[in-house]
Each structure stands twice: as C-alpha cells, then as structure tokens.
Amino acid sequence: MNEAGPPGPRRRLAVVLFNLGGPDSPAAVRPFLTNLFTDPAILRLPAILRIPLGRFVAARRTKAATENYAILGGKSPLRELTEEQARALEGAMAEEGVEARCFVAMRYWHPFTEEAVQQVRDWGAEEVLLLPLYPQFSTTTTGSSLTVWHAAAKKAGLSVPTTTLCCWHSDEGYAGATAAIIRKALTEARAALPEGAKLRLLFSAHGLPETIVKQGDPYQWQVERSAAAVMAALDMPELDHAICYQSRVTPQKWLGPSTEEEIARAATDGTAILVCPIAFVSEHSETLVELDVEYRELAEHKGVPGYFRVPAQNSDPAFIRAVAALVAHARTETRGSRDAAGGKLCSFAGGRQCPKAHTGCPHSAAQPMRSAA
Ligand SMILES: C=CC1=C(C)c2cc3[nH]c(cc4nc(cc5[nH]c(cc1n2)c(C)c5CCC(=O)O)C(CCC(=O)O)=C4C)c(C)c3C=C
Ligand SMILES: [Fe+2]
Ligand SMILES: [Fe+2]
C-alpha cells in the first residue's frame, strides 16, 4: 500500500517539483523539442506515427526556438529558477516545522524525472509528495509528468507512501501572493501612464489545442478559476480584465482568444495592457521572449497606448510560503482519492474540484479514499 497517512515526525520527506524543463545549450534545443513532441500526452497518435511526426515537428521548430533561446544567452533559465524555488521552499517548510528535501523533476530535459526518482531513492526518502509547479492541471503537463514518475518509480523499486497534489488553481495563498505582485505592477503601470488612461489586466495562459480540451482536459476551466480567484484577492471590481492564450506552436485550432487577438482589441479600444502570465510560476522563454519581446513589439506596432508585464512569482517569499502551506496541507489531507499506484491524490481543497465533464481530471481515474482497505 502506498498511502502517506498521517505524517511521521521523523520521516524523510521528499517533495518533488514537477516542471517542463528547457534546453541548457543551443545543441540541446532539438533533442528537448523531440522529447516534447514525441510525448503521447502532447501528440496523441499511435507510436508508429507519433515518433516520426514528433521528430519532424521538432526539427521544423528548432530554428525559431533556438533564436528565442539565443535572446536568453542560449539556454532556458527554468532549471536554475526551479532549483532556487526548491531551496526557498525547503526554508519555508522548515519554518513551518516540516523537515523536507526538494527535488526537481523536469519532463523534457535535465534533471529528467527519471533522474529525480534515482535521487529520491538514493537519499532514502520514506515519504514522497509530488508537487507540480503548474497551478492548473493539464493532461499535457502534470498528467504527463505523473505518468513518467510512476513508471520510473516502479522501475527503480521506489515504493514509499506517496501523495500527489494535482492542482492548486484557486488556492487562497497562491491567489493572494499573485494579487500582491499584480498590485505592485499596476501601481508602476499607472504611474507611467497619463492620468485617467484606460488599463486592462490580461491574464495570459499557455495555450492548448482545442481537441485536448474537448477530450476532457480541465486546464481551461482551471485557468478561468485562477483568474477569478486572483481578481477576488485583488478586490478591484472596477478593474477591466480578460483571459487569453499564448504560445500556439502547431497549426491546429488552439484555445482562444489568443494573446495576439487581445493585443489587437486593446489597440482598437485605446487601452493600455498589463499582461500577467497565469499558468507559469517562473520566468522562461515564453515570458522573457514571447511576452517581453514579441508581444511588446506587436503591441507597439498596433498602437496599444502602453504595454506592461507582471513578473512571474519565481521565489517571491509570499508565493513560496503559500506553496509550503499547500505541502503541509496535502500531507495531512484526509479527503481526496487513491490513485492507481495506491497513493493519495488530492487537490488544494482536498477532494475533486473539477466538474464531472472534465474526465481528464486525475480524480476521474482514481478510487475514493474510503474504499481503500
Ligand atoms: C503541442 C505543443 C504544446 C503544448 C500542448 C504545451 C502545453 C503547455 N506547456 C506549458 C508550459 C511550458 N511550455 C514550455 C515550452 C514549450 N512548450 C511547447 C509546446 C507545447 N506546450 C514548446 C514547443 C515549447 C518549447 C519552446 C518553444 O519552442 O517555444 C515551457 C518551458 C520553456 C522554457 O523556456 O524553458 C513551459 C514552462 C503549459 C503550462 C502547457 C499547458 C497547459
Ligand atoms: Fe508548452
Ligand atoms: Fe481536477
């Protein structure tokens, strides 16, 4: 049995931070993209088609992605920023009386999830908590990382009580910390604009092909919940705001409106915009290049009267404290479900939050806790 149960005071707790990963050199861009586009959670085709097509799509994307990473010095900053979050989280948990070590498990580049499994096993973890650094659950992100974690843990013989926190899209601590960062950015934006100028807050989330959402992925619903929770924490009912989706990378129809469309609408409306990345909690190519360079240029070209950006949370102390509280809560949570590996699966609020139609919610494939022997 793989359930965590009540936390033992001396148990060696490993908190595993899931993220996507990014290339650490120009030479790594193509293999990183190949790992991404051949993932069955991303390209939903039989392996015989998926692998050649995924390699082809990765090869075609390599030039544009390499140019983007060149702006960042030839690599993604995601690994270093996630390691910093890990160290900050260890400190915040220690302050709450939780002695734990954080491990970084990336999905498509080093340190790979399989490497993290080895580290957790070699460290002698007696309890594991799987913590996605994605506030919203998507089958393409957290779902994919969970699949790889469970396969790698089984292969490595890592069998300790494991808790999965599947999502924290409208956790109060997260929403409050995000609102505080927005408030500061709003003050700065307003100071740079003429008095009385219109300003719209744009929550920009990573996009997703519409077909994946139609297959039951709860991501869009959770993004909408996040925006609503942050607006509630901001407590500025008069603030104009909208949700949009960035980073479309395949020709299929993706979720809309796109961030480009919202930039065009802002130009038509003569309103400045403050763009807040809502599905990322660290800076990386899609914030530092897409938002800060490409969309800024587009906004200037379209005549948007002001373009501002809310920084990602990174290791913001209030954000890290909120994540530490999520960990503490998940460990003692008695609601939730039991996943296929026998571990505890819970959301930030305990049990399942997603409406039943979202069959991609991991609780759909899990058993209620109380049915466990
Ligand atoms: C079909 C392709 C993609 C889907 C679906 C997708 C979903 C998705 N991704 C994130 C978060 C991140 N994506 C990042 C990079 C990235 N994503 C894709 C493609 C899809 N993502 C590509 C091709 C890339 C590489 C960069 C590029 O070519 O533009 C990253 C990391 C970037 C870095 O700099 O390290 C993150 C983080 C989410 C949240 C999401 C769906 C919910
Ligand atoms: Fe992505
Ligand atoms: Fe869910």
Image (cartoon, rainbow, N blue to C red):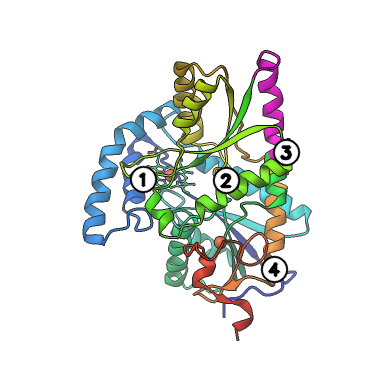
The C terminus: image quadrant: bottom right
The answer to which of marks 3 and 1 sits earlier in the sequence is 1
Residue 192 figure quarter: top right
Cα distance in 3D space between marks 2 and 4 = 26 Å
Q: Tag on residue 333? A: 4
In front of the other: label 1 or label 4?
4
Residue 5 figure quarter: bottom right
Taking 215 as reference, is 356 left or right? right
Query: Residue 120 at x, y = what percent?
Result: 55, 62
Cα distance in 3D space between marks 1 and 4 = 36 Å
In front of the other: label 3 or label 2?
3
Q: Which residue is mark 1?
A: 32
Up-down relation of residue 134 to residue 259 (above or below): below
Taking 210 as reference, is 350 left or right? right
Cα distance in 3D space between marks 2 and 1 = 19 Å
Cα distance in 3D space between marks 3 and 1 = 38 Å
> Looking at the image, which is closer to me, 330 or 97?
330
The answer to which of marks 3 and 2 sits earlier in the sequence is 2
Q: Which residue is mark 3?
A: 234
Q: Amino acid at mark 4?
A: Glu
Q: Which residue is mark 2?
A: 83
Q: Amino acid at mark 3?
A: Leu
Mark 1, secondary structure of its residue:
helix
In front of the other: label 2 or label 1?
1
Query: Residue 248 at x, y = what percent?
Result: 39, 39
Query: Residue 311 at x, y = what percent?
Result: 61, 32
Q: Amino acid at mark 1?
A: Phe
Taking 53 as reference, is 297 left or right? right
* Residue at the spot 64% in from the left edge and 81% down from the top edge: 370
